[in-house]
Amino acid sequence: MDIDVSLVITLGDFRGRLKVKTTHWFLPYTGLLKEEIESGDLTYMGMTFPVTLSGKVERVELRP
């Protein structure tokens, strides 16, 4: 997943690209069971910086 980001900070404008790597688990006829963020990086002015990201989405109940 790539996300264009734009921030305005006291030092000026910041525009870059945030890239997030995720893993998804799906079950046929049910949909998404689980999603985990694995890593991320931010590209700004041709330089890439690692970004610490964490997160998880997990389905806890299945209903017919």
Image (cartoon, rainbow, N blue to C red):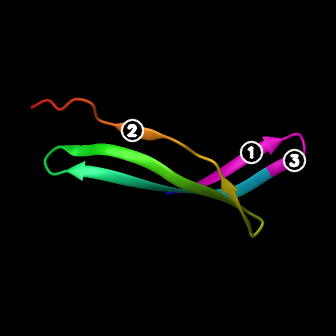
Query: What residue is disc 2 on?
Result: 57
Q: Is residue 37 left or right of residue 47?
A: left
Element carrying mark 3? strand
Residue found at x 90% / y 45%: 11
> Badge 3: how crowded within 10 Å, few (<14), some, or many (20+)?
few
Q: Which residues are magenta?
A: 2-13
Query: What residue is disc 1 on?
Result: 7
Q: Is residue 7 left or right of residue 31?
A: right
Which of the marked residues, 1 or 2, is nearer the chain's N terminus? 1
Query: What residue is disc 3 on?
Result: 12
Residue found at x 14% / y 29%: 63
Amino acid type of disc 2? Val
Element carrying mark 2? strand
Amino acid type of disc 3? Gly
The question of residue 30 being in magenta is answered with no
User: What x and y, as percent, mark residue 24?
Assistant: 35, 52
Residue found at x 59% / y 55%: 40
Residue found at x 29% / y 35%: 59
Instruction: Point out the frontmost of discs 1 and 2.
Output: 2
Residue 55 is tagged as none
Q: Main secondary structure of the magenta part?
A: strand
